[in-house]
Amino acid sequence: MTSVDNPKEEAHGLSFLRSDKRTWVYEKRFLFWVLTWGIVTACCKYLIKNEFVVEPLNWAVALLPVFFALIPLRAYYRFFTHADEMLRKMQVESICISFVVGLFYTIANLMLEDVGLTAADARDVFVIMMYSFGIATAYTAWKYR
Amino acid sequence: MKNLLKVLRAQHNLSQAALADKLDVSRQTVNAIETGKYDPSLPLAFKISKLFKQPIEDIFFDES
């Protein structure tokens, strides 16, 4: 960190702040790995569904996206830990909101199952959590704008 | 919590972006602190204090 009293330190290339650049790099890395994971998952699904791989190799193919998911998870963790502190707060709030929405959906579904509602699929909960995370991110961005 | 960040920034003729760069945070963070929407972490408050050479309690104070 520099002091405000040194005029030599005032010259900055401010079009792209250090913090913004760091966030941008880690965010893009994370998006790249998410996209790669999506492609790997789709390929594995295709191979298994069309029975291109036989047992026991199909187990390995099925587990590949699971272990591959560790890479985007690590990329997100790096993005999160290197992010600007307010962005971190926004991410934490968004994660909390999506978790609570997912939890409420699961509890509500468990209760409504008894009165005839179709049981919730794990994928439904995931999709609901992802959507609520997106909405929560937009909300927190608006809140701290 | 209220603060005098905007005043200090103006006194030192710094833009929000310039201050953000010095503190290694985003311009949005500086803006949110100035408008009172976001309270900085203790390390960031210390950075601000060190930058403007003023005690933390002179920059940040309780609203009540």
Image (tube, coloured by chain):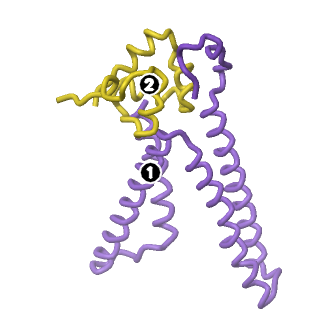
Element type where label 1 sits in the image: helix
Quarter that holds the C terminus of chain A: top left
**Relative to B39, is A46 above or below?**
below
**Marked residue chain, label 2:** B
- The chain coloured yellow is B
**Relative to B58, is A46 above or below?**
below
**Three-letter amino acid code at the position of disc 2:** Asn
Q: Which residue is mark 2?
A: B31
* Location of residue A1 in the rendering, given as x and y in whole percent from the top left corner: 57, 29
Which residue: 52% across, 69% down? A123
Which residue: 40% across, 63% down? A102
* Location of residue B42 in the rendering, given as x and y in whole percent from the top left corner: 40, 39
Which residue: 72% across, 74% down? A64
**Three-letter amino acid code at the position of disc 1:** Val
**Marked residue chain, label 1:** A
Please name whichever residue, B63 or A41, is drawn nearer the observer in this view of the structure: B63
Left or right of A15: which side holds A133? left
Task: Count neighbours of disc 2 (C-alpha within 10 A) and say few if under 14, some if 14 to 19, many if 20 or more.
Answer: some
Which residue: 42% across, 56% down? A98
* Location of residue A50 in the rendering, given as x and y in whole percent from the top left corner: 77, 78
Query: Mark 2 to mark 1: distance in Å?
Result: 20 Å
Task: Name the tint of chain A in the rendering.
Answer: purple
Task: Count neighbours of disc 1 (C-alpha within 10 A) and say few if under 14, some if 14 to 19, many if 20 or more.
Answer: some
- Residue B23 - label: none
Q: Which residue is mark 1?
A: A92
Q: Quadrant of residue A20?
A: top right
Kindly check if marks 2 and 1 are in contact, taking CB atoms under 8 A apart as contact.
no
